[in-house]
Structures are given as C-alpha cells and as structure tokens.
Amino acid sequence: MYLRFVAALLLFVWTAAGQDKNFFPKPSYFRETFSTPSAKVEMMPPVRLSDFVVDGKLELSLRSYVELVMANNTEVAISRLSVDTAQNAILRGFAPFDPLATANFNNTRTKTPSTDALQGATTLATLSQPLNFNYSQLMQNGTQYQVGFSEIKSTSNSGFSNFNPAYNTGLSFSFSQPLLRNRGSYINRLPIMVARSRVRKTEYDLKNTLIGLLSQAELAYWQAVQLRENLRVQESALDLADKFLKRSQRELELGAISKLDIYQPELQFVQAQASVSQARYSVLQQDEALRRQIGADLDPDIRKLPITLTETPAPPANTGTLDGESLVERAFVLRPDLKSAIQDLDVDDLQIKQISNSMRPDLSLTGVYTAQGRGGTAYIRQNVFNDIGSRSTVTQIIPGGFGDSLDQLFGFGYPVYGFGLRLRLPIKNRQASADMADALINKKRDALQARSAEQQIRLEVLQAVNQVESSKTSVDLAVKSRDFAKLRLDAENKKYELGTSQIFLVLQAQNDLINAESNVVVQSLAYRRNILALLRTTGELLQERGVATQ
C-alpha cells in the first residue's frame, strides 16, 4: 500500500540532495553506514634495505642513510599521523551542513465505550496509522530548510465517518533565514576555515618535528663515523706500540738497553690493545643505534649484516666567511616553528570573528508552506442526526484510496502558508564578552610568542654561525698540530737511533701523535655537527637532504 509513496519520497529526497555527490544511495553510503571498519593495524616491513647491501655488508652513504630513515623510522611514521588527524577535523567542520532524513511510522488501535450518541457507535473502534518523512539541511549561507511528507490512514466503526478508511496527506516546506547572527557563508564556514588553518599549522609542526628527528639521526651517523675513525686511530697506535715493542725487545736481546727499559714499551702495547678493544665495542654499540634509525633491526636478515659507512670526516674546504644576517633572514622565511607561531595568529583572528558573531542578536526570517490532501472510500449518509446515531443510512459509496489523497495534495488546492520574524535578544551576554576578552588576550600572547620565536631564531642562527667559524679554525689548528706531532715523532726516533734520546721521550711523542690524530677527527666531526646545527637553525635541513614532507 505504501510502496508507491515510499518510492516517490525516496526519489524526492534524492533529488533534493542531488548537490551532494556522495549522498544516498551511492554504494559508499552503505559501506560507511553498515560495514564495520577493520580495527586491525597491519605493520609493514622496512623497505629498500636490500638496495644498499653490497658484498654482504650494509653500505650507507649519508644520502642513502637519510632516505632509509625517512622511509622506515618509526618515530617519523608516528609524526606523519598528526597531519591525518588534523585533516579529519576539516571533514568534521562540514558536519553541520550534512542533510538528515527521518522516518516515523506508528500503528495504534483503540476500542473505547461511547459516552454520547455523536461518537457513532456503542463501542468506538479506531485504527490510526500515521507515517511521516522529513528531510532537513543547513545550507552554508545559514539557511535551514525542512521538507516533510505526512500521511495518516485511519479507520473507524463510527456511523458518522464520511471517509472510511480515510487518507490525510500533507506536504510541507519550511525555512529559517538568519538576518544577523550566522548570516552568510563566511560566518558559517568559519569552523572549516579554522580546521584548515590548523592543518597548515600541523604541517609546519610536522616539518619542525622531522627536522629534529632527522638531526638526531644524522648526529647518530656522524657519531658512528667518529667512533670508526677513533678505532682507526687506536689501531694505528697499537701498530706503533707493537713496532716499538719489537724494536725494544730486539735491542734488549742485543744488550743495547737494560731489562728495566722494556717495561714501558710493554705497558704502552697493553694499553693500546685495551683502547682498540674498547673502541671496537663502541663501534658495535653505535651500529645498533643506526639499525634502529633505519629500521634494519626489524628485518631478521639485514640486522645481521655489518654496516659500512662511506662518509669520512674530511677537513672542511675554504668556504669563506658566513654572512650571519642573511642567514637570519633566510631562517625567518624557512623556519617551520616560526611559521607555526604565525599561523596561530590566523586561528586567533578566525576565533575572534566566531565570538563576534555569537554576540549579535539572533534575528531570523521564517516561512512555511503546507499542501493538504484527503482521500479514501466516501460514505454518503442520511438521517445522521436522528435519535440513534448508529441508525444513519448510507445512500452511496464512492470508492477511493491513497491515490485520491495524493492527487488532491499535489493539486495544491488547500494550502497553509505563512511568514514570520523571530528575535532572540540577549540583554546581557557575559559569557560571550569573557570569551572575546580571552580571545584578544590569546592573540596578543601568540603575537608576543611569535616575536620571541624570531628573537630566539636570530640568537640560534648567529650562535651556529660562530660555532661553524670556530670549527674551521679548530680543524686547521688540529691538522697543523698533527703535522708537527709527526715531525716530532720522526725526530725523536732519529735521535733515539743516534743515542741522544730516551725511550720515554719516543713513547711520549707517539702518544702526542695519537692524541693529535684523535683531535683532528674530533674537530672534523665537530665541524660536521656544527654545519648540521646551522642547517637546522636556518630551516634548510630538509631541503638540503632532499626530504619531502608530503
């Protein structure tokens, strides 16, 4: 009985919401509404590790290491999810404009004893079956409209019923248009604009987080390089100690030195062995940290492979003097944390406009139009108001039904319409006033924080520039000290061969050379770290390493 009506109403609702591309009855609607999303999280294995396996070793340049960090590092993957969460807030901002369709059906049967003759039966039995469909939506310009269709089928054993069963239908349209508060697309889209502004802020925060994570990962790489160079230096010291010990043992056999003079070379050799052993342990320990950075610890085959690093702590080339002020200006343009602080001001402006809108009087124009229809089997009666109402006589029966009611409804012959104004005027709105005061304070605070961030950036960049310049000088002096230490060791060896020097002076010269070589490694790696710090403070690190955040 209701199939024709239901089909017509579904077609009407679909047409009314045709501006929404994803609206019912698209297949996506059923998937999103009735399917249960899988809560299973599939952990993907690390990628591209096998691309850098050479001769059974994991060979890593700085560039390949950075690529693996960005592809497999767990902390990087966690940081990227923050943007997805912020983008979901944009979808949530469109929620007030989502259309809503409701349906309601009731079936009520009653039997009551009559109390007067006008009820038309000794025992009045009625059946009421009201059915209602409504479609409502808030438009982005602030207009809220509602379209409704109602139908009531009623039957009764009353002798006074002219239509039995009777079908009463109604089609209504109503709207409410704000005139002051919530008027216009700009005001109603403010939550969406705030969400989009926060997405941009989240993207800046992500870049800042990635810069920090990449800086930590690169520091771990250079630490591994330094430990390898330190192992090389200690192995060189062990080789020198071994050669000098063998030479001293030969001299002892020839009687050139006494037994008392052999203890110092032996002690030097044992200490060199201990230093080499400790340096090797440190290298292995740092390699585990590198494996975690690139996700190699998650692959049972790759994590067993030794790591080879191709970068060397070569002394810096003469790059000239850095211009601190130009680097500061570049940092003001590139630093994502400063952009994030400035983006807060945009959010503050939008929130101030939201609060300003809430302080306006709520004046709305309302309108309603309703069409009515009636149908059913008609009973023409006579002698209705005789002494016994139930004895009325039916003189004619005119067949009818639900279709007659719809024909009359869409003939629009029985309309009900009206317009009106609705005003809600808050005499005092202390909460909104307090919210506005807080919003203005928040904007001032964010403006001061942005200025403080600029001051901090200037300080960090200038300090990083000074550290780089200082490192250049330190590396140059360390190289010169190493060269002089080599000359001194050669001189002491020749003097010792001529018998004009002593063992402890040769050993001291060896120690000085080892310390000088170690200092060259330390200062060269310090220069690398200071260059890294400069790239981080100017915001150029991701660009220099070819890292994309999208």
Image: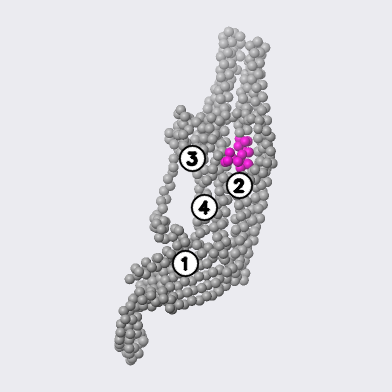
Q: Count residues near mark 1 (Cα–Cα under 10 Å), then give few for <14, some for 14-19, many for 20+.
A: many
Q: Which mark is residue 136?
A: 1
User: Disc 4 and disc 1: Cα gap in Å?
Assistant: 27 Å
Q: Residue 524: image x %, image y %?
A: 62, 30
Tell me the amino acid under the disc marked 2. Asp
User: Disc 1 and disc 3: Cα gap in Å?
Assistant: 48 Å
Q: Which residue is mark 4?
A: 87
Q: Which residue is mark 3?
A: 72
Q: Describe the element under mark 4 as helix, strand or loop.
A: helix
Q: Nearer the viewer, mark 3 or mark 4?
A: 4
Q: Describe the element under mark 1 as helix, strand or loop.
A: strand
Residue sitting farthest toward the top: 254
Q: Is residue 413 left or right of residue 541?
A: left
- Vertical side of 499 occupied by 337: above or below: below
Tell me the amino acid under the disc marked 3. Asn
Q: Earlier in the sequence, mark 1 or mark 2?
A: 1
Q: Quadrant of residue 8?
A: bottom left
Main SS of residues in magenta: helix
User: Disc 3 and disc 4: Cα gap in Å?
Assistant: 23 Å
Q: Earlier in the sequence, mark 3 or mark 4?
A: 3
Q: Quadrant of residue 397?
A: bottom left
Q: Looking at the image, which residue is at 59% across and 68% down? A: 180
Q: Is residue 53 left or right of residue 505?
A: left
Query: What residue span does the magenta drawing correspond to?
Result: 529-544
Q: Which residue is mark 2?
A: 337
Q: Quadrant of the N terminus?
A: bottom left
Q: Nearer the viewer, mark 2 or mark 4?
A: 4
User: Disc 1 and disc 2: Cα gap in Å?
Assistant: 43 Å
Q: Count residues near mark 4 (Cα–Cα under 10 Å), then give few for <14, some for 14-19, many for 20+.
A: some
Is 22 contained in the magenta span? no
Q: Earlier in the sequence, mark 4 or mark 1?
A: 4
